[in-house]
Image (cartoon, rainbow, N blue to C red):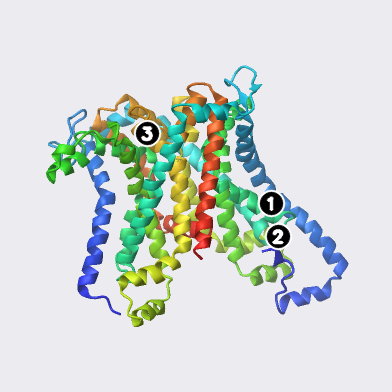
């Protein structure tokens, strides 16, 4: 985009070049480039003041001990040491990583499978289906969480379904179960994210040149080979972006956990976001909360970088 | 390569099963919301007697009058404010070649990856210092800031996709920057702006963590934030909870159904271009 100014539109722009001298043009352009900043100023002010400045402040607070009221004291890396040695904070980071499996990996895999199954078919009625698949994306996660609390409860739909197929031996209050709570929580994410992945992939698959499939067919390749040699490479961009979106949703999850399990039972479903909230606003340990928020951000950035590197390598 | 009839039937079967999996949870709470309040409810069961009273009861008990008006005040301020800020900035970044424009574009995009958790801890204390906690203005400005990266990015992409000839032609005719923006660009930008507006409305309506932290006063919380605490008080009254959830879900579902094209294009194209 940097060459916008130098790009000469044939015909029309030439006329203008002829009427102004080079010196006047340069002066006008510099002034124009300065006044162009005025348009950005209001947005930049709000963005810097209410997002970037607090973010930097949180990073600073991660190096101090502070209860939010009395003066703070500099403690260096002490807050980070607390996090890595605390019996509750370490597992929360781990749970965030486990959720990636359910929020990102399974939905992407499932989305790809459905894309392979559905692509190239009659597109009639697709709009209605797309509206339904996208629905979980637009709902407040709090309401989604409350809905699933009820579905997972002893009398809920899940157990009713299990009873129906004769699996009444394994019914339980899933979100209250020590071993299964995290998985149950993760599956809510799978439910919410699969539609998004699938719609993204189907849109991408629509752009694939049909002749590529015909070439594979001529080579005697079946539908599985078509999928792996044509579809999968063609969807690399969509897969990357779907994994980034869903991974951020997994690592930075809060709303869903807050209303479904609130970290329980016995801290089996704590996630970083939940502990940041608790440490800062229930326990008044701003330093540790900030340190955990910084670590969470680093984790997000690391995973995104990894996904992008992986995507590039496959190119 | 005409798909065979059985393959088409198979496709529809898969799509229908998947749609059922998405919709079944909603069927479950809709049915539950019509059960008598406090009733012992099973997963999927038709109410013995259909009752609307849960909605009225939930509305009263959760103070939805306050919650919904707070939600509307916040969302209806965030949307226009953000659109104006974002449009001006993106117009400049995309067409006026401002000094340091490339760096600023990057600066805005970086915000797409920052988790809210990183911002909100210090934000609460920063806003407290200037008296903006428990205030609509605080939440509105914070949301405008948090949603800004996507908006700038979205509108910048849009303006960059407009043919340069159109802008050049207007310039030759003597139009200044503002005239170009309002007379030339805006009239052809309504689809992009509408998409952004509905996404902003949705994000603002659904925002939870930010609101429960910045609004300690329960009467000023938004509908989802209020719902998050309501569930703690009435955790066993499934019909009441279901009704309350449906009240919070309804506005956003209505907006979604009206603007579904905008939603889908915003979330898919917005993502893919990144």
- Marks 1 and 3, Cα distance to the nearest angstrom? 46 Å
Crowding around mark 2 (Cα neighbors within 10 Å: few <14, some 14 to 19, many 20+) is many
Q: Report which residue position mark 1 lands on.
A: A39
Contact? badges 1 and 2 (CB < 8 Å): yes
Q: Is residue B215 visible?
A: no
Q: Report which residue position mark 3 lands on.
A: A269
Quadrant where the N terminus of chain B sits is: bottom left
Q: Measuring 35% from the left and 42% from the top, which residue is drawn there? A: A186
Q: Secondary structure at mark 2?
A: helix
The chain carrying label 2 is B
Q: Report which residue position mark 2 lands on.
A: B96
Quadrant of the image occupied by residue A23: bottom right
Q: Secondary structure at mark 3?
A: loop
Q: Measuring 62% from the left and 16% from the top, which residue is drawn there? A: A70
Quadrant where the C terminus of chain B sits is: bottom right
Q: Is residue A295 visible?
A: yes
Q: Earlier in the sequence, mark 1 or mark 3?
A: 1
Contact? badges 3 and 2 (CB < 8 Å): no
């Amino acid at each position: 985009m940097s060459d916008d100014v130098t790009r000469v539109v044939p015909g029309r722009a030439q006329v203008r070049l002829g009427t102004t001298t080079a010196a006047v043009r340069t002066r006008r352009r510099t002034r124009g480039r300065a006044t162009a900043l005025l348009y950005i100023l209001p947005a930049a002010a709000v963005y810097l003041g209410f997002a970037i400045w607090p973010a930097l402040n949180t990073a600073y607070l991660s190096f101090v001990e502070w209860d939010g009221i009395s003066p703070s004291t500099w403690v260096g890396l002490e807050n980070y040491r607390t996090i890595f040695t605390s019996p509750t904070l370490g597992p929360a980071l781990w749970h965030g990583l486990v959720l990636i499996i359910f929020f990102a990996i399974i939905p992407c895999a499932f989305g790809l499978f459905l894309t392979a199954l559905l692509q190239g078919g009659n597109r009639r009625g697709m709009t209605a289906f797309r509206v339904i698949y996208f629905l979980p994306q637009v709902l407040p996660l709090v309401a989604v969480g409350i809905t699933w609390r009820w579905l997972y409860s002893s009398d809920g739909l899940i157990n009713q379904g299990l009873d129906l197929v004769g699996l009444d031996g394994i019914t339980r209050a899933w979100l209250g179960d020590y071993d299964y709570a995290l998985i149950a929580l993760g599956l809510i994410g799978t439910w919410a994210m699969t539609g998004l992945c699938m719609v993204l992939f189907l849109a991408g698959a629509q752009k694939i040149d049909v002749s590529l499939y015909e070439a594979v067919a001529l080579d005697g390749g079946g539908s599985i080979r078509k999928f792996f040699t044509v579809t999968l490479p063609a969807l690399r961009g969509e897969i990357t972006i779907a994994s980034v979106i869903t991974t951020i949703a997994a690592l930075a999850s809060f709303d869903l956990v807050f209303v479904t399990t609130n970290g329980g039972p016995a801290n089996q479903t704590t996630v970083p976001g939940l502990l940041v909230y608790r440490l800062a606003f229930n326990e008044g340990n701003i330093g540790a909360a900030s340190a955990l928020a910084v670590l969470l951000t680093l984790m997000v950035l690391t995973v995104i970088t990894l996904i992008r590197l992986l995507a590039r390598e496959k190119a | 390569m005409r798909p065979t009839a059985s393959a088409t039937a198979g496709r529809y079967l898969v799509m229908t099963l998947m749609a059922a999996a998405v919709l079944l949870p909603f069927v479950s709470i809709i049915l539950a919301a019509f059960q008598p309040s406090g009733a012992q409810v099973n997963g999927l069961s038709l109410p013995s007697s259909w009752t609307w009273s849960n909605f009225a009861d939930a509305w009263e008990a959760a103070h939805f009058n306050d919650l919904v008006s707070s939600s509307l005040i916040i969302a209806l301020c965030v949307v226009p404010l953000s659109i104006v800020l974002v449009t001006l900035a993106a117009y400049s970044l995309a067409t006026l070649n401002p000094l340091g424009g490339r760096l600023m574009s990057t600066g805005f995009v970086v915000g797409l990856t920052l988790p809210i958790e990183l911002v909100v801890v210090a934000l609460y204390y920063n806003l407290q210092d200037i008296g903006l906690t428990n205030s609509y203005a605080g939440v509105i400005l914070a949301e405008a800031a948090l949603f800004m990266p996507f908006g700038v990015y979205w509108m910048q992409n849009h303006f960059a996709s407009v043919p340069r000839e159109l802008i050049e032609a207007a310039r030759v005719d003597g139009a200044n920057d503002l005239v170009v923006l309002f007379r030339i660009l805006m009239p052809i930008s309504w689809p992009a702006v509408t998409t952004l507006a509905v996404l902003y409305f949705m994000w603002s309506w659904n925002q939870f963590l930010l609101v429960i932290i910045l609004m300690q006063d329960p009467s000023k919380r938004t509908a989802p934030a209020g719902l998050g605490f309501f569930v703690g008080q009435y955790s066993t009254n499934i019909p009441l909870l279901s009704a309350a959830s449906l009240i919070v879900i309804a506005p956003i579902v209505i907006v979604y159904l009206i603007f579904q094209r905008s939603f889908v294009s915003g979330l898919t194209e917005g993502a893919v271009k990144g």
